[in-house]
Amino acid sequence: MKEGVRMFGEEIPYERLVNNTSYEDRKKYWDIAIGLQATDNLKVSSYLKELVKDSLDNQYDYEVIEEKLKAYHLEKMDTTSRESEADLSALRINEILMMPDFRFSIGTLYAYHSLLFSNIPNFEYPVGKKRTYNIYKEQDVLNGESVAYTNYQSIDDTLQYDFNEEETKMNTYDDLSIEELVLQITQFISNIWQVHPFGEGNTRTIATFFMKYLQYFDIEVSNQPFKDHSNYFRDALVLANASRKVKTDKFLIMFVENAFLNKENQLDKEEMLQYIKDKTIK
């Protein structure tokens, strides 16, 4: 069903796009959006889960859900919890995944970050803008070491290089199998994740871009890997961008095969930790 919106001076009016995604897809995207919060060790509120149930049955507008969430968190007056961030970014990830539009560009990546994190209480980082400082984060899958994230002064040049390289490769993608295509795009996504262009919210933003990019090629995502193993996804990206001695894309490929190629690899963090232990001993 579409609601007509008449535009002045046009015989054929534009029409308001109304979401008619199936119940199954709506539930799948909610599962993914909520699961992705685990990449930053966040959990959504029980109130959002109630709203999701109602929205699946009644298809609440996003504006209505956002208004309800903001009122809920305003009433709680919790100035330290990141629950409101989890709720609102999950809502917005879901909204992006449900819409058909996508443009392959650095601008889209920055726009997604802005959409996910604008006007969220306690989110103290610039939204839709690159970081202006260098970062370090201890990772348990690297025995407390950090990925060597891109120097903030090189973010623009590195992203431009990665996007230019990928755009060149896109001309050959019609000749690839689905598996080859997914694995090729996975390498690109891993590269831009290593850049870590934002102060916070990189994995959620880049994962959203990843799924939208594959949707562009009519490749859909399974909800279960992102719903239940988003932390594994992040750790797999860490290992794929670690130092030369321990670097491996084995675990990232296993996750991606489950998420986009309907495989059933066992996603076990203990296997990652054992891998690092063995590499360190050597």
Image (cartoon, rainbow, N blue to C red):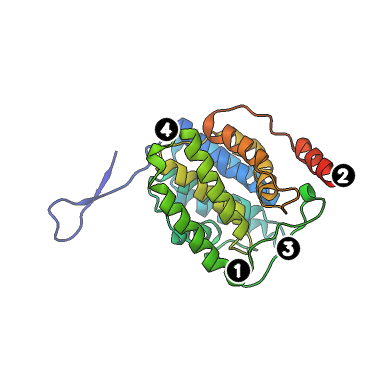
Q: Residue at x 67, y 60 (%)?
A: 77
- What is the secondary structure assignment of the residue under circle 4? loop
Q: Residue at x 38, y 47 (%)?
A: 171
CA gap, disc 3 and disc 2: 24 Å
In front: 58, or 138?
138
Q: Residues within 10 Å of mark 1 (few under 14, many from 20)?
A: some
Q: Considering only order in the chain, which callout, 2 or 4, is on the residue closer to the N terminus?
A: 4
Q: Considering only order in the chain, which callout, 2 or 3, is on the residue closer to the N terminus?
A: 3
Q: Position of residue 48 (x, y in %)?
A: 59, 45
What's the residue type where badge 3 is placed?
Tyr
What's the residue type where badge 4 is placed?
Ser
- What is the secondary structure assignment of the residue under circle 3? loop
Q: Which mark is residue 281?
A: 2
Split into 4 quadrants, where in the image is the N terminus? top left
User: Which quadrant of the structure image shows residue 33?
Assistant: top right
Front tag of 4 and 3: 3
